[in-house]
Image (cartoon, rainbow, N blue to C red):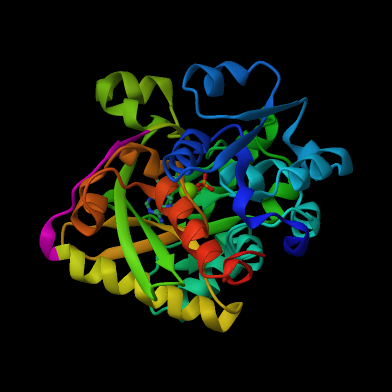
Amino acid sequence: MLEGYDVSKLSIGTLGSHSALNILKGAKDESFRTVVVCKHGDELVYERFRVADVMISVESFEELANDEIQERLLELNTILVPHGSFNAYIPTEKLLKLRVPMFGNKQLLVWETNRELQERWLRRAGLRLPKVFKSPDEIDCLVIVKFPGARGGRGYFLTSSPEDFWKKAESFLKTGVLREEDLRDVHIQEYVVGVNVYPSYFRSLLHEETELLAIDRRYEANVDALWKIPASEQLQLDLSPTYTVVGNIPLMLRESLLAEILRMGDAVVEASEKIAMPGIIGAFCLETVITENLEIYTFEISARIVAGTNVGIGTSPYAYLRHGENMFMGRRIALEIKEAAEQGRLEEVLT
Ligand SMILES: Nc1ncnc2c1ncn2[C@@H]1O[C@H](COP(=O)(O)OP(=O)(O)O)[C@@H](O)[C@H]1O
Ligand SMILES: [Mg+2]
């Protein structure tokens, strides 16, 4: 596909949601033409902020894989930048078969859609992970029970014994929050008591460096609202925490933790090379909990830009430290594409 491209007239394109403003603004700052494939009704976001040169409206994001839309993107010499909505709304087989070149390593996008594969990757990198329980009957500490599918933590619950697990699972089945098949794919993790920290990195193949560009924490409903309800009322309401991400909050980490955070990023990159050469290309993020003893536990990985880097649009302190003003994840991605194009190395950063 790349052979048919006019490399002097590239477009950067993405789906209109998640971190599209970040990606498109970054692309414009690096003088690319920008394309957004967005859902009817969402056009105003990309119009109002003036980040999209070309807008393609669709009923559903899955249409990205349709021939007609792919042809249009190919005509525009588009390089797609994937984000969370690619995994959430486009079936993996379709994602792998997209003809429009994508910045990043598609194979690793597949790894991130599966909790067992993620775990294997993170263990291989030598990171500290929460204990995983194979069966509900082994639960012997506070655990978080997760189910597949991007549901913003709906149906996830905390429990600390097999008896309570089955009681809660049955009640969720009864109310329709969970289905029988969900229980087959249940993932039970030790619940780590601490604060959530989400470092975002950029692995540059061209510069052979893994940069730390932003750190955020998530603002989740209703778990971040429970403390506002007095304990006596909480007991009467019988509330369960849910984790629907509503936004992100920037975070500066205690400096003594940074050495480990940087080493973790390097280790994840090294492990990724063993999984799918050339390993991670571009953005990735670790989801961690840091305890009162300053131990860092990693419970998830995203092998692409995360919405947490949106807090750095313009400049995040970490991006500033490394690059000076006006650098952020979306722009860093565009810069890598620009440099790769200039050096005739585009095929190295696309899949
Ligand atoms: N092992 C854990 N210990 C403590 N909190 C956790 C753990 N795993 C997840 N969480 C909390 O639950 C939220 C949702 O879990 P996550 O695994 O990120 O699922 P999702 O697929 O919805 O992103 C996290 O953002 C975090 O607040
Ligand atoms: Mg998560």
**Residue 288 percent across, percent down from the top left:** 35, 57
Whether 171 is drawn above or below 181: the answer is above
Number of numbered discs overlaid on the protein picture:
0
**Residue 20 percent across, percent down from the top left:** 53, 36
Name which residue lies at 55% across and 84% down.
Answer: 274
- Position of residue 87 in the picture relative to residue 262 (left or right): right
Name which residue lies at 50% across and 29% down.
Answer: 51
Along the line of sight, the residue nearer the viewer: 208 or 309:
208
Give the position of the C terminus as an image quadrant.
bottom right
- Position of residue 229 in the picture relative to residue 187 (left or right): left
First to last magenta residue range:
248-256
Along the line of sight, the residue nearer the viewer: 29 or 285:
29
| Residue 156 seen in this snapshot | yes
| Residue 138 seen in this snapshot | no
**Residue 342 percent across, percent down from the top left:** 51, 64
Instruction: List the single residue furthest toward the bottom.
Output: 274
